[in-house]
Image (cartoon, rainbow, N blue to C red):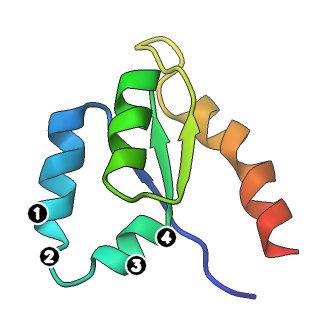
């Protein structure tokens, strides 16, 4: 089974920092699932070349766990 990765960016600033951190490995990063909390970050990610962007609202109460649970079926469907 191929390993699948999911990356999270909570803001456009975080997204840009992530891209700088992965200089030289942008292709792998941009082909991973990117989990974002709202449309502004999703639009920025798509404009920067991310292929798989999942918008999943997150809050302090639910945290990122529920967002990851919602993303899992999409990752599994892609793997089959």
Reading the image, the residue beneath label 4 is: 31
Disc 1 designates what residue? Answer: 20
Graded by Cα atoms within 10 Å as few (under 14), some (14 to 19) or many (20 or more), the crowding at tag 2 reads few
Q: Compared with residue 68, is residue 30 higher up or lower down, i.e. above or below?
A: below
Q: Secondary structure at mark 1?
A: helix
The mark nearer the N terminus, 4 or 2, is: 2
Residue 41: percent from left, percent from top:
35, 32
- Residue 38 image-quadrant placement: top left
- Give the quarter of the image for residue 10: top left
**Crowdedness near tag 3: few (<14), some (14–19) or many (≥20) residues, C-alpha within 10 Å:** few
Whether the residues at callouts 3 and 4 have beta carbons within 8 Å, the answer is: yes
Q: Which residue is rendered at x = 38% and y = 59% of the image?
A: 49
Question: Is 77 positioned to the left or the right of 53 in the image?
Answer: right
Quickly name the residue at label 3.
28
Is residue 65 visible in this depiction of the protein? yes
Disc 4 element: helix
Asked if marks 1 and 2 touch (Cβ < 8 Å), the reply is yes
Residues at discs 3 and 2 in contact (Cβ within 8 Å): no
Q: Position of residue 35 (x, y in %)?
A: 49, 43
Q: Residue at x 41, y 34 (%)?
A: 43
């Amino acid at each position: 089974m191929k390993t699948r990765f999911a990356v999270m960016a909570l803001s456009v600033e975080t997204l840009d920092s992530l891209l700088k951190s992965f200089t030289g490995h942008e292709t792998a990063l941009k082909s991973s699932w990117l989990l974002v909390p709202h449309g502004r970050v999703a639009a920025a990610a798509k404009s920067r070349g991310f292929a798989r962007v999942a918008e999943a609202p997150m809050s302090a109460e639910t945290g990122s766990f529920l967002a990851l649970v919602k993303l899992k079926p999409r990752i599994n469907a892609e793997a089959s």
